[in-house]
Amino acid sequence: MGTKTKGDAASVMGAAIGLPPDSRIADVGDMYRQLSSSLDAPQITLDGSKVDRVDTAALQLLVVYQRELEKRGHAMQWAGVSAPLYDAASQLGLAQTLALPAKKPA
């Protein structure tokens, strides 16, 4: 009871996660491991500003991740979202679901 484990430290602090420039199905396994390791953090900040390519598999993973965070009572916010990420999420009707910030004009 008196000692803190590594998991306890993660639950006290927030987590910042940068999505890779190529966020497609080939990288979903790596994204899954990174995201799932942060599920106990009370505040998550995702940075999608460097995403050049994204596919449905990656967006589905982000939706599942966000829903799991909500179930746990944790919050997620975006530090940045690239135009390709925003456009792909919008085309699939997921921009609002993922609470993406409004797209900035070019």
Image (cartoon, rainbow, N blue to C red):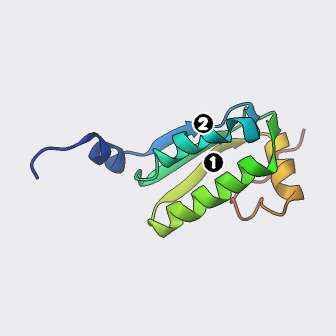
- The three-letter amino acid code for the residue at tag 2 is Asp
Q: Residues within 10 Å of mark 1 (few under 14, many from 20)?
A: some
Q: Residue at x 46, y 46 (%)?
A: 38
Residue 95: image quadrant is bottom right
Q: Residue at x 84, y 41 (%)?
A: 84
Mark 1 — residue?
78
Picture layout, residue 70 above or below residue 9: below
Q: As drawn, is 17 to the left or to the right of 82?
A: left
Picture layout, residue 44 above or below residue 69: above
Q: Please state which of residues 103 and 97 is positioned toward the viewer in this rendering.
A: 97
Instruction: Residue at the far left: name it.
Output: 2
Q: As drawn, is 43 to the left or to the right of 5?
A: right
- The three-letter amino acid code for the residue at tag 1 is Trp
Mark-to-mark CA distance, 1 and 2? 19 Å
Position of the C terminus by quadrant: top right
Q: Please state which of residues 10 and 55 is positioned toward the viewer in this rendering.
A: 55
Given contact means CB atoms under 8 Å apart, are the residues at marks 1 and 2 in contact? no
Percent x, y for residue 3?
A: 13, 44
Q: Is residue 104 visible?
A: yes
Q: Is residue 100 visible?
A: no
Residue 42: image quadrant is bottom left
Q: Residue at x 43, y 46 (%)?
A: 14
Q: Residue at x 66, y 53 (%)?
A: 62
Q: As drawn, is 13 to the left or to the right of 63?
A: left
Percent x, y for residue 76?
A: 55, 55
Determine which of the numbered discs, if any, sits on residue 30 in the image.
2
Label located before the other in sequence (1 or 2): 2
Picture layout, residue 105 above or below residue 93: above
Helix or strand or loop: what does disc 1 sit on? Answer: strand
